[in-house]
Image (cartoon, rainbow, N blue to C red):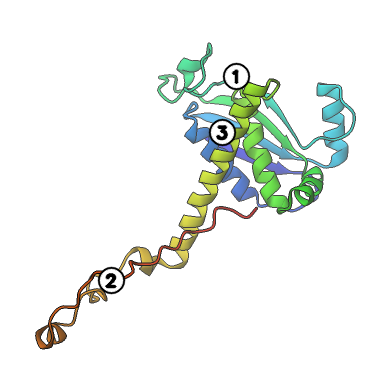
Amino acid sequence: MSVEINNESGLAADEDALRELAQYVIDQLETHPLADLSMLLVDEAHMTNLHEKWMEEPGPTDVLSFPMDELRPHSMAGPNRARGRDSDDPEPVLLGDVVLCPQVAVAQAKQHGHSTQAELELLTVHGVLHLLGYDHAEPDEEAEMFGLQNELLSDWRDETAAKSTAARNPAASSPDPSSPDPSSPDPSEAAAAPPESQEGREGPALCHPPGGCC
């Protein structure tokens, strides 16, 4: 599986994060393992042209999806369901194109109260789900798509934050086996006094990594 990103928008974006997120969504939905995805970031003028040409609607929009081989995840019924992760077909397939407009994302990010990158990440998940056949034309479709969108985005951010925390502090996840366990009592103290009762003592503090940047 490969995700190619081309930024022609004139605005900076964390392209590596968007690529990893798109790959995560495709992987979680068990799409074809050799599916290729193209992502294009464009300015408002380019997005306006695409929006008017393909959707016959005026002005720019935030994201457009152009499916190619119409793959479907295993969770969805459809004629291409057999072309999921268990497919014996060794040939790569083109999932399609996702086009984002960072300029529109900037305005929407301000409305939603989070960063432009967070908005681009949300739009990336939204665009990939459209390529996989999800839609929001009907209320039940909207509930399913947006629920899955939020779940995938939240899980990816949690996983990314956990990896980042482990990378910054590897000793915390891989303790030195030669170091004494701070929770073990000193043998000399244990001999000099009876063991302290554990009843009523607080357990270890749990520090959860942030769920995302929005």
Q: How packed is label 2: few (under 14 Cα within 10 Å), some, or many (20 or more)?
A: few
Distance Cα–Cα, label 1 vs label 2 = 50 Å
- Residue named by callout 2: 176
Mark 3 or 2, nearer chain start: 3
Residue 172 position (above or below residue 58): below
Q: Give the residue type that dot 3 points to.
A: Leu
In this picture, residue 64 sits left or right of residue 58: left
- Residue matched to label 3: 148
Amino acid type indicated by mark 1? Glu
Q: Residue furthest top?
A: 79
Q: Residue at x 54, y 21 (%)?
A: 72
CB contact under 8 Å: marks 1 and 3 = no
Q: Is 187 in front, or is 96?
A: 187
Query: Is disc 1 surrounded by few (<14), some (14 to 19) or many (20+) residues within 10 Å?
Result: some
Pick whichever of labels 1 and 3 is earlier in the sequence: 1
Q: Secondary structure at mark 3?
A: helix
Q: In the rendered image, which quarter is residue 169 located in?
A: bottom left
